[in-house]
Image (spheres, helix red, strand yellow):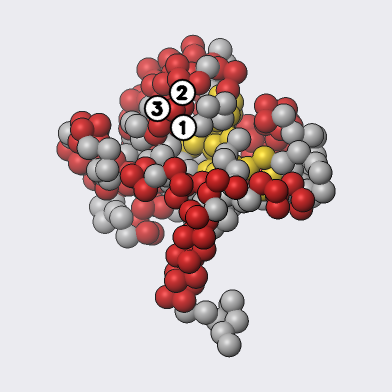
Amino acid sequence: MLSRQSAPPVVKQAGRAVTRQVGRLTSGMRMLPDFLLVGTQRGGTTSLWRALIAHPCVVPPLFHKGVHYFDVAYPRGMGWYRGHFPIRSLAHRQAQGAPVVTGESAGYYMHHPLSAGRIAADLPGVKLLAVLRDPVERAYSAHRHELSRGFETEPFERAIELEESRLEGEVARILADPAYVSHSHRHHSYVDRGRYADQVDRLFGLFGRERVHVLFAEDFFSDPETEYARILDFLGLPRWSPEAFERHNARPRSPMPESLRTELADRFAPHDERLAGLLGVTPPWRR
């Protein structure tokens, strides 16, 4: 019999398909997320997620950190989505009576034009975590990430030049057809994703400031204990700390040309200024 380590991809995929079907059939017994880590992509979400699911009161979804239901899989229905989460009675039993919460992390939720409204409608009371990073560094890191995944073929400067034409009309197509998945909006939004003020303002409008916790990746990586404690307080979880805060998915890359860095920083300046007004604090990359 094949071990779990030696099972070929086709076997793993078949096993997951069966498990998801079981999850769908038992969806009424399963938990729904108490919190969502909604972004931003390449903003340190994986590192924060790993620290969160290490907490003894947090149980993760069954397959991946992000189900991507509210952005690209919404037509599958709530039963499909709920099937990805633990059975409530088993989760409480494993926690030996302690309060437990579950959630997921999908970096596209904050940027997708329909996700926030869908979340607000389907998960009343859910809390949102949004991690923001220097938008210039985020864009550069995202480009490297998309290159490695085969979703990008152009060098960074050319991809920035192409972004406006690649994204032209894509938001309108998403709004017109809820089943439409835009490749370029998801994989080529290097500058657009870094215009944080509009995205945060939309979250505040739908959920209220009390249900949205915004933090900066730079602060989390420089002082993870303090930022982690604030997140636990926001989620209503008992104070606890992992043995170490590790940094995940950091990719080596060549330095960005200073002229391009300056150009992008200037393009982001009005959005950063508006973000500072919304949050009442200057982002660390502008301090």
Q: Position of residue 99 (x, y in %)?
A: 76, 38
Q: Which of 158 and 249 is in front in this view?
A: 249
Mark 1 / mark 2, whichever is N-terminal: 1
Residue, x 33% and y 44% (percent of image)? 75
Say which quadrant the C terminus sits in: top right
Looking at the image, do the residues carrying marks 3 and 2 touch, with CB atoms under 8 Å apart? Answer: no
The count of marks equals 3
Q: Which amino acid does label 1 sit on?
A: Asp
Q: Position of residue 259 (x, y in %)?
A: 34, 35
Location of residue 57 with respect to 250 vertically, above or below? above
Which residue of the protein is positioned furthest toward the bottom in this rendering?
1
Q: Residue 117: which numbered mark, if any?
A: 3
Residue, x 20% and y 33% (percent of image)? 176
Q: Position of residue 87 (x, y in %)?
A: 63, 51
User: In the image, 130: left or right of 188?
Assistant: right
Mark 3 / mark 1, whichever is N-terminal: 3
Q: Nearer the viewer, residue 73 or 246?
A: 73
Q: State how far apart marks 3 and 1 are (Cα).
A: 9 Å
Of helix, strand and loop, which one carries label 3? helix
User: In the image, 270: left or right of 218?
Assistant: left
Q: Where is residue 24 in the image (x, y as percent from the top left)?
A: 48, 54
Residue, x 42% and y 75% (percent of image)? 10
Which mark is nearer the camera, 3 or 1?
1
Q: Residue 262: which numbered mark, if any?
A: none
Q: What residue type is labelled 2?
A: Leu
Of helix, strand and loop, which one carries label 1? helix
Q: State how far apart marks 1 and 2 are (Cα).
A: 15 Å
User: Which residue is labeled 2 in the image?
Assistant: 203
Q: Nearer the viewer, residue 240 or 126?
A: 126
Q: State how far apart marks 3 and 2 are (Cα).
A: 9 Å
User: Which residue is labeled 1 in the image?
Assistant: 122
Q: What residue type is labelled 3?
A: Gly
